[in-house]
Amino acid sequence: MLGSTELAARTYMNTLESFCFLLGFSLALAAQIQIAHLYGAGKTGEAYRAAYKVLTVGLPLVIVNAFILVVFGTHVLRLFTQDSDILALCVTLLWMNLMLQPGKMVNMALGNSLNAVGDTRYTMKISLIFMWVVATGCSYLLGVSLGWGIVAIYSCMIADEYIRGVLSYFRWRGRKYLRKKKKR
């Protein structure tokens, strides 16, 4: 439905995005382990601050990494294709990836932090709802049904990451599970 140019661009972008994603995901997983350890030891204040520490380190790293992809991505893509339509579309998607990665980092870091302290139902519920409604539903509506293509689909992916990241932020800031641990 999207066409070969958009599908090829998405395939190339999926590979390039993994470089940003893996760095952020690795940091989020490391934070999850650290927070679970601190939480289990009853150090809830340190556990709470650890989530923000990973964001302090992770956000600049994924932004710089995504910006490096913007600068050098076209050169890398030319190793795989010379199709000017695919390259032009990928340039747009590289800039959109620069917007996507900070939201993804917040979502992963805080979502994993919530999981580390046992608040897994919350992250599961918001993930199910917003991935189905925003990432999938809106992507299909805007990208396929209305014919706005892969740029609309990327926009929906960005919206999904930021919505879940903001919801996870407010949940983490509320310290619900951290307060429960202190009461025990």
Image (cartoon, rainbow, N blue to C red):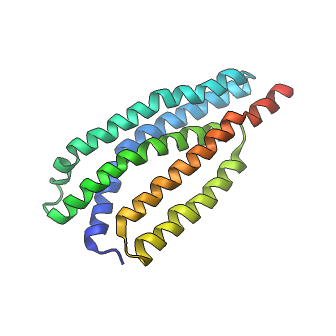
Which percent across, then down, holds residue 111?
Answer: 60, 43
Q: Residue at x 47, y 72 (%)?
A: 140
**Among the 4 quarters of the image, the one containing residue 9:** bottom left
Compared to residue 74, the image places residue 113 above or below, namely above
**Among the 4 quarters of the image, the one containing residue 117:** top right
Which percent across, then down, holds residue 116?
Answer: 66, 37
Compared to residue 95, the image places residue 32 above or below, namely above
Q: Residue furthest right?
A: 184
Q: Residue furthest left?
A: 82
Q: Residue at x 58, y 44 (%)?
A: 166
Say whether residue 52 is left or right of residue 119: left
Say whether residue 158 is left or right of residue 166: left
Which percent across, then down, holds residue 112?
Answer: 60, 40
Q: Residue at x 32, y 53 (%)?
A: 15
Please tell me how many numbered marks the rendered image carries.
0
Which percent across, then down, holds residue 97?
Answer: 36, 49
Q: Residue at x 31, y 61 (%)?
A: 11
Instruction: Tell me the quarter of the image containing the C terminus.
Output: top right
Say whether residue 44 is left or right of residue 67: right
Instruction: Tell me the quarter of the image containing the N terminus.
Output: bottom left
Compared to residue 142, the image places residue 101 above or below, namely above
